[in-house]
Image (cartoon, helix red, strand yellow):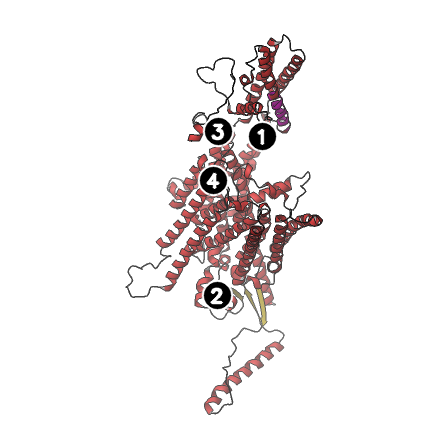
Amino acid sequence: MTKSGDHGGDSELEISAALFLYSPTALFLRAPPEEPEVVPQISLVPTLALLLGLPIPFGNIGEVMAELFSAVEDSQPHSSALAQATALYLNAQQVFRFLHTYSAAAQDLQVEEFHRLNNLFSKASADYLRLLQSPQGAEAALQTVITELQEFLRGVRAMCIESWARFSLVRMAGGAALLAAACFLCLLIAQWATSPGFHLRPLLLIPVAWGLAGVVVCAGLLATTELKLDPVVLGAVAAMGSVLHILWKAWAGWGSKRPLAALLPIPRPVLLLLLIRFAAFFSDSFVVAEARAIRFLLGSLILLLVAQLHWEGKLLPPKLLTIPRFSAPTGPSRHKGTHALGLGVGLLLCIRLAGLFHRCPEETPACHSSPWLSPLASMVGGRAKNLWYGACVGALVALLAAVRLWLRRYGNLKSPEPPVLFVRWGLPLMVLGTAAYWALSSGADEAPPRLRALVTGASVVLPRAVAGLAASGLLLLLWRPVTALAEATMGAPRMRTVLTPFSGPPTSQADLDYVVPQIYRHMQEEIRGRLERTKSQGPLTVAAYQLGSVYSAAMVTALTLLAFPLLLLHAERISLVFLLLFLQSFLLLHLLAAGIPITTSGPFTVPWQAVSAWALMATQTFYSTGHQPVFPTIHWHAAFVGFPEGHGSSTWLPALLVGANTFASHLLFAVGCPLLLLWPFLCESQGSQKRRQPHGNEAEARVGPEEGEEEPLMEMRLRDAPHHFNVALLQLGLKYLFVLGIQILACALAASILRRHLMVWKVFAPKFIFEAMGFIVSSVGLFLGLALVMRVDGAVSSWLQQLVLAQQR
């Protein structure tokens, strides 16, 4: 073997590899040459297969080493030539079948060369079969057949290499430039979004017009020059036309007055992290070991967040060292610092636990994949299987209980809206259906013969029922997304007189002076209340509760409803990873909320640290669910969940199921991305709850006369500045797309620059495909998450308007 310049590997095992063959007789007719002959690696496969008497692999296009099939003990050269011709003929037959099968599926082979090789094989095959019937005096003819078969095999190999190794440098450069411009555009608009003169509508309409104009001009030029319309080129022109307008406007508006560094508002630690991740995609060793590298990067970013909290004085008291020795330090700061440290330690522990569910890539034979990724049906011991099944069901129950406790803590579980009722009754049914399906699938082979038909039917019905319940819950959430409670009472709210308990009859004048006024005031209030109830036009007071967490409640409910169908597509023990996913997200959101200040009037921004940590956590969960960015590790069994008999001729449904299984983490984190903006406002109630305990821990927004101490507005602060709220959502989405775009740009550049590398088809090209699909799924999920927040915002506006109209009537 050669070194990495020719082969692509530089390890000791690779460059010292050799093939040792032993034979009691001579293998070659003549002495071997002084310099060894170079043999392509793909030629070893058919040679060893025929020597061992095994079939040649169907997809191999190598050429057998004909010298190894010479019968040297026989003095007649005819026998040696016939043995070589037979080996080459068997090899050519296999290559011919592969070539015809491939040409029927793909149309990228050269037509003229294909027909020439087809005719060459037909002629050589006919000559070989004719020589078998009359073998005497055919040495020259056998040499001609050997030459034709070798020419056919080498021609097929050259044609396939030319077809498979074709790269359009123009398209590659254009695509990379387009990706880079799109990333820069996301960064630019995210920077512009907080400026006072920013307007969203012209930003969306004008680029679309420029893109359509570019498509029309390009199509006209191609039509006039009679060139073929390439949809890829037209799409690139449309995208570049929409980008050029904004870039030109930015260049004209920016000018040379301000430094270019102001366009990069990313903090230096986060920028360094992105640069490291960008450069690491060019190393096949990093791509192979990315699962471990992602855990390290995410842990480093969490430590950075904790250090930043300490640096800003939010972790410990700011003057801890200057406090006298016996003076008591401030309690809230110490409590907050301990709380933040606990969040960081919990996050690191969750990352460590999620790393136990890992799958080793094929390039690391010394690594051993986690046995917990296999389904329960593959386990042998009945007791161990039952214990694992109980742990998986316990994870489902814990996830359900955590969501219900969270909704109850913020009071949204008291709402009479249909989504809340579904959370109360529908989610337990989904848990029950999932647990029943796991029980059937793990013990299907052990079922009695008379019950196997019932088990098969239940294995079809239960996953579909869980998916149907999840779809129904999401539709209910879109229909009535406001999980709040409204109460209407006649008359203005007032404080009732509290009667102090008094036992026994009054025995003195002081007792009479104390008891009689209380009885008088109580009778006065009762009479006043009866009079107000008799009036038909009394004042109406409407109180709205749980509005402070209305956005987050809808997001958490939607994520829970999405998680259960996605969980069904994975192995049973992955439920523990999903539980860790929700726990990690909860801890990270609280840690990020501790460092994000709450502004009352806007603008509202999400730090780059938060967005980067969220994207890294999505990638880390991708690896923790047993996936790798290579095709052999795809969980194909997900296509048969709910469809054990197959899908017939349908291809989109199994592709959808397998894609949902593969990119479940991308979808969940993209849909939940708006929580990065909402969670700091949601945590505003924690400081207020330490000073007072409102009834039911509810955040109130009153329409009508207000009394008592002001309640925390929490997420209702976002509605006080609707323009800043919309801009913050746009900025958050652009930041998340920028972080994902940097990854796919790095993968595209790595696959294009290293297109001649041996590992391009094994590592770089699959990684690019997986990153591209993950980017598409994340973009769709991000759009759905932002659309849900906007739907809740519109529903809240309509709901409040109805309350105001009800009060006026």
Q: Is residue 775 above or below residue 753?
A: below
Determine which residue is flagged by label 1. Answer: 230
Q: Earlier in the sequence, mark 3 or mark 4?
A: 4
Determine which residue is flagged by label 3. Answer: 758
Q: Which mark is residue 711?
A: 2
Query: Which is nearer the eye, 436 or 801?
Result: 436
x, y percentage for residue 47? 55, 22
Quadrant that contains the N terminus: top left
Q: What amino acid is found at the position of numbered circle 4 in the picture?
A: Cys
x, y percentage for residue 228? 59, 27
Contact, mark 2 vs mark 4 (Cβ under 8 Å): no
Tag 4's secondary structure?
loop
Which marked residue is nearer to the observer: mark 2 or mark 4?
4
Q: Which residues are magenta?
A: 91-104
Q: CA distance from mark 1 to mark 3?
A: 30 Å
Q: Is residue 468 visible?
A: yes
Q: Residues within 10 Å of mark 1 (few under 14, many from 20)?
A: few
Q: CA distance from mark 2 to mark 1?
A: 61 Å
Q: Earlier in the sequence, mark 1 or mark 3?
A: 1
Q: What amino acid is found at the position of numbered circle 3 in the picture?
A: Leu
x, y percentage for residue 449? 70, 48
Determine which residue is flagged by label 4. Answer: 367
Of all residues shown, which one is farthest toward the top?
137
Q: CA distance from mark 3 to mark 4?
A: 22 Å
Tag 1's secondary structure?
loop
Query: Which is nearer the eye, 337 or 227?
Result: 337
Q: CA distance from mark 1 to mark 4?
A: 46 Å
Query: Which is nearer the eye, 360 or 682?
Result: 360
Q: Earlier in the sequence, mark 1 or mark 4?
A: 1
Q: Is residue 79 above or below residue 701?
A: above
Tag 3's secondary structure?
helix
Tag 2's secondary structure?
loop
